[in-house]
Image (tube, rainbow, N blue to C red):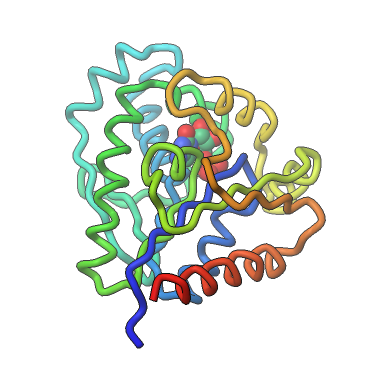
Amino acid sequence: MRSPFIIVAIDGGAASGKSSSARALSDRFHLLHADTGSYFRALTAHLLLKKVPVDDPAGVRRVLPEIKLTTHVSGHSARIEIDGRLTGEEIRSKEVNAAVSHFAAIPELRALLVQYERGQAEAARSHGFNGLVMDGRDIGTIIFPNADFRFFLHADPAERARRRAREGQTDAVAERDRLDSSRQTAPLACPQGAVSIDSTLLTLAEVVAIMTTAIEEGIAALR
Ligand code: C5P
């Protein structure tokens, strides 16, 4: 039987395992995967390249209208292109880690990505996927509040810092969470009706198993 088109929203703090579990679900259910953290990172790298300081929202507002965002679908992954260019590993740099939450608090920058991200449901359909799995901070609250499946991942901050260190990254996860949770526009929060998962003591496979069961049961009920 043909699968229904589904939207899966995964939200959570820095290094909570969102993107890894979203990638696993995209393989399992043939969904397009959108890692929205990478979109905020790509815009941050672009703004830093344009020499816009993090404390200059007017400078950000000046640059935004010149930016053209498009999507490159590569395998299961929806990658952002800025002015026709894909970004690379520079979006994981220590400079981007330190700046991204400051730029992400600017309402105009968020508004640009809200439109772009909603459009990815259509990209998923037109590329023949069974749906879209999107991870970030505001997916189940703002981008797709009616997503078929909503998950909220959290984990002990010390464990999350260890995960980043194992990846060889310098990243103040607790500080980014503080900024992301306290901003005025679209703060990080557990979406209504989301399945909340504490991943501190779970392996990635265990987290994915919980999500997979919930989605399989939900799909069976949708049929
Ligand atoms: O997911 P990742 O840690 O790569 O996200 C980088 C930053 O992008 C976050 O700390 C947050 O400031 C911002 N972000 C956001 N909303 C999203 C995704 C990411 O504000 N949906």
Task: Tell me where residue 27 appears, x and y as whole percent.
Answer: 48, 74
Residue 79 in picture, x, y percent from top left: 35, 55
**At 52% across and 41% down in the image, what residue appears?**
192
Q: Is residue 115 left or right of residue 187?
A: left
- Residue visible at 45% across and 28% down? 186
Q: Residue at x 52, y 61 (%)?
A: 22
210 to the left or right of 216:
right
Question: For residue 121, which quarter of the picture?
Answer: bottom left
| Frontmost residue, 198 versus 156 | 198
Q: Residue at position x 24%, y 60% from top?
A: 123
Tell me residue 220's x, y (percent). 47, 76
Q: How many marks?
A: 0
Name above or below for residue 109 compared with residue 152: above
Can residue 115 be spotted in the picture?
A: yes
Q: Quick one: quadrant of the N terminus? A: bottom left
Residue toward you, 105 or 44: 105
* Residue 171: % across, % down: 65, 36
Q: Judge whether residue 96 can be spotted in this image.
A: no
Q: Is residue 24 above or below residue 66?
A: below
* Left or right of 111 on screen, residue 48: right
In the rendered view of the protein, which quadrant contains the C terminus?
A: bottom left
- Residue 47, by quadrant, is top left
